[in-house]
Image: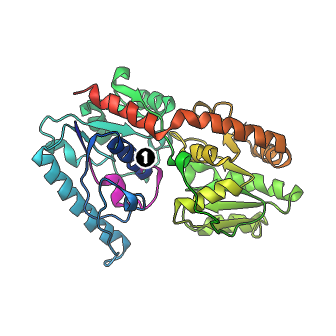
Amino acid sequence: MKILYDHQAFTGQRYGGVARYYHDLIESLSKMGVDIALSIQFSNNEYLKSSSVRKPKQFKNIFGFMPTNMLVSRTNRMNSVFQLQRGNFDIFHPTFFHNYFLKHLDNKPFVFTYHDCIKERFNLQHIDNSTREQKQEILSRASKIIAVSENTKADLLEFYDIKADKIDVVHHSTSFINHKQPHNYYLKTPEKFLLYVGARNDYKNFDGLLKSFKSVVKKHTEVQLLCAGGGNFNESELQLINQLGLKDNVIHLNFHSDNTLFELYTRAIAFVYPSVYEGFGIPILEAFACGCPVVLSNSSCFPEVAQEAALYFEPNSEDDLTDKLLTIINDSSLRNSLIDKGFLRQNDFSTEKKAKQTLAVYKSII
């Protein structure tokens, strides 16, 4: 059996959950002896730098960021079309929503992974360029659909015309379970901090976190909120931080390796995930693997993923979030209990388990 993956998730993403999902899946399947092909020629994706399957050539933004990325994307797409037309594969697995591949499959089966329905639920048009109709066509023509959580499966059944038995749930995983941190890894961080990871837009509820954190700082002036990744603070975020008097307590750190992110989880008082909606939430698994207590909103997929291994708050209540943050800071026995529960819970999300379940999906359509 040979599986062909395309370029989409890796062309524009240097980091990110979707690219990491496919990289870890491809590597795990390859180690299991599955014949894997990745149709990409150029990429600056960090995960592919260590790939055993395909290490594409890196490129410089010689025409500016967007024009260069568009050129690279079209070049990679032409390569994917060439691989599709050759037909040297048994199953195709596209990695994002562009439907260029549909007219080149020549009746070969394909599997599509759906990560979340956030765009559909919140009508956020900027998340991707695909229309509801384009997605419906892809989902209708796919031989199987993989949903990354039961919550995402329920959303797919709500927003699209799909039969339930066409969707298989395969949870995410994290390679942090097997991460080997370099000896004496150096990283300068505050002594006491809560950790926020990733993007901060829209449904992520970052503003709500800032407002709750203001009340935390009144009782714990020594605690800082460290925001890792997601780009530098924008003008409106800086304005809110200043308005709340948090200029000295909220900091941002860009990171360029898993070693840095691993270290942040390890040192943090707790990882805070205030988002009102997610399809899965890979940072939860990362925190579990690093022995970091987790504070989550009690919404969407979070209870499904974390179960008893997290401290939950109501996402629309700033007072409740404040209360839970103070609780996690003050109660060391609770932190230790959540760490132990997180280590146990992470065993359900190994990369090997995800790969085996995905392989079973592939075999079901051959």
Name the residue nearer the viewer: 247 or 288: 288
Looking at the image, which residue is at 49% across and 28% down? 150
Going 29% across and 36% down the picture, which residue do you hit? Answer: 111
Query: Is disc 1 placed on a helix, strand or loop?
Result: helix
**How many marks overall?**
1
According to the image, what is the colour scheme of the structure? Answer: rainbow
The residue sitting at the right extreme is 219
Residue 313 in view (yes/no): no
Query: Which amino acid type corresponds to the residue marked 1 in the rendered image?
Result: Tyr
Q: Is residue 17 magenta?
A: yes
Give percent across and percent down for residue 229.
Answer: 56, 62
Q: Which residue is mark 1?
A: 21
- Residue that sits furthest to the front in the current view: 183
Does 15 sit above or below residue 307? below
Q: Residue 168: horizontal and vertical position, in percent?
A: 39, 27
Residue 3, given in percent of the width and then of the height, sits at: 25, 41
Name the residue at 61% across, 42% down: 276
Image side of residue 124 versus residue 76, left or right: right
Vertical placement of residue 269 versus 302, above or below: below
Q: Which residues are magenta?
A: 5-18
Residue placed most toward the observer, 310 or 221 = 310
Confirm whether the magenta stretch covers residue 267. no
